Image: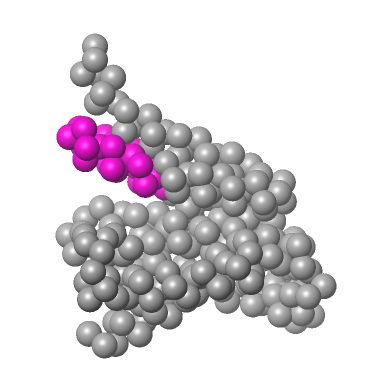
């Protein structure tokens, strides 16, 4: 009985991730971006600990791997899609796009589709043990959650820059980044030395002022910084 409970601890944590993603999706469809982002972050915490727990308890299983991908596509695929779906209903639509304005919100679900593709690729890609190939789905979800919250709370300030066209372009770009072949660094530290973790330290140092000055909206700026730094370091190699 004890062994059965231990074997299922990681799956229970993964299920908490899935549960958080379901709530985040509901909150997003209600236009409650703050709560949606909160549950995406909570899901990311569970996502971090389920794998760690499985390794510590030596109870990794094929079922756990499949459940993890399913949970991730809800929390980091469907939830950000729901966020963008609701955001499309708030932002301005350029005049030339008015004939298709009723269709634009549904393009948000491209995020779910490409997130599923990203997760499927990750499961069979042996190159992604210490770094990533393409945008990680949690990073993409955090980007959309923080961006939507920032736009919603500062519509008068950002409304001019973020209209339906710019959001559509961002959906396409971020979706393609999910399945791209762009190498992106991981924040896994094998040691604390500067030389071994130079990129990660530089990334974290710049993150601090972004969060201080931009607050929650700074999360979206941090993801952009993550992409830029990955491109820079990729070119160096």
Q: Is residue 169 magenta?
A: no
* Number of numbered discs overlaid on the protein picture: 0
Q: Residue at x 42, y 69 (%)?
A: 204
- Residue 131, horizontal then vertical, whole percent: 26, 65
Q: Which residues are magenta?
A: 47-72
Q: Quick one: which residue is furthest to the front in this view? A: 193
Q: In the picture, which quadrant includes the C terminus?
A: bottom left
Q: Residue at x 56, y 72 (%)?
A: 210
Q: How is the image coloured?
A: one colour
Q: Is residue 57 left or right of residue 67?
A: left
Q: Is residue 157 above or below residue 60?
A: below
Q: Position of residue 149 (x, y in %)?
A: 68, 60
Magenta region includes residue 54: yes
Along the horizontal axis of the image, is 119 left or right of 158? left
Residue at (41%, 73%) from the top-left corner?
203
Is residue 153 among what the camera can see? yes
Q: Estimate the x, y position of residue 91 in percent, counting from the top left.
A: 75, 68
Q: State whether the magenta stretch is mostly helix, strand or loop.
A: helix
Q: Is residue 88 visible?
A: no
Residue that protrudes farthest toward the bottom in the picture: 236
**Furthest residue in direction right, as rendered:** 156
**The quarter of the displayed image where residue 226 is located:** bottom left
If the image is split into quadrants, where does the N terminus sit?
top left
Viewer-closest of 171 and 45: 45
Residue at figure coordinates x 21%, y 55% from the top left: 124
Q: Nearer the viewer, residue 66 or 148?
A: 148
Please tell me whether residue 16 is drawn above or below residue 94 in the rendered image. Answer: above
Seen from the viewer's position, the closer of residues 158 and 99 is 158
**Residue 138 image point, x, y percent:** 44, 56
Based on the displayed image, in which of its 4 quarters is residue 58 positioned? top left
Up-down: is 64 above or below 3? below
């Amino acid at each position: 009985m004890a062994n059965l409970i231990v074997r299922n601890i990681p799956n229970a944590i993964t299920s908490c991730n899935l549960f958080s993603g379901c709530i985040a999706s509901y909150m997003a469809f209600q236009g409650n971006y703050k709560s949606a982002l909160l549950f995406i972050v909570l899901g990311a915490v569970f996502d971090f600990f389920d794998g760690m727990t499985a390794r510590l308890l030596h109870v990794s299983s094929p079922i756990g791997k499949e459940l993890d991908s399913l949970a991730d596509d809800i929390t980091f695929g469907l939830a950000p899609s729901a966020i963008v779906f609701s955001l499309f209903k708030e932002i301005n639509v350029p005049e030339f796009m008015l004939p298709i304005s009723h269709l634009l919100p549904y393009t948000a679900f491209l995020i779910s589709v490409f997130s599923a593709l990203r997760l499927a690729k990750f499961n069979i890609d042996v190159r992604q043990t210490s770094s990533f190939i393409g945008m990680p789905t949690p990073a993409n979800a955090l980007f959309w959650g923080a961006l939507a919250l920032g736009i919603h709370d500062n519509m008068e300030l950002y409304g001019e820059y973020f209209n339906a066209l710019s959001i559509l372009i961002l959906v396409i770009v971020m979706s393609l980044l999910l399945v791209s072949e762009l190498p992106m660094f991981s924040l896994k530290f094998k040691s604390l030395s500067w030389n071994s973790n130079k990129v990660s330290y530089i990334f974290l140092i710049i993150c601090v002022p972004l969060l201080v000055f931009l607050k929650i909206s700074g999360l979206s700026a941090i993801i952009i910084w993550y992409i830029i730094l990955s491109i820079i370091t990729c070119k160096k190699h």
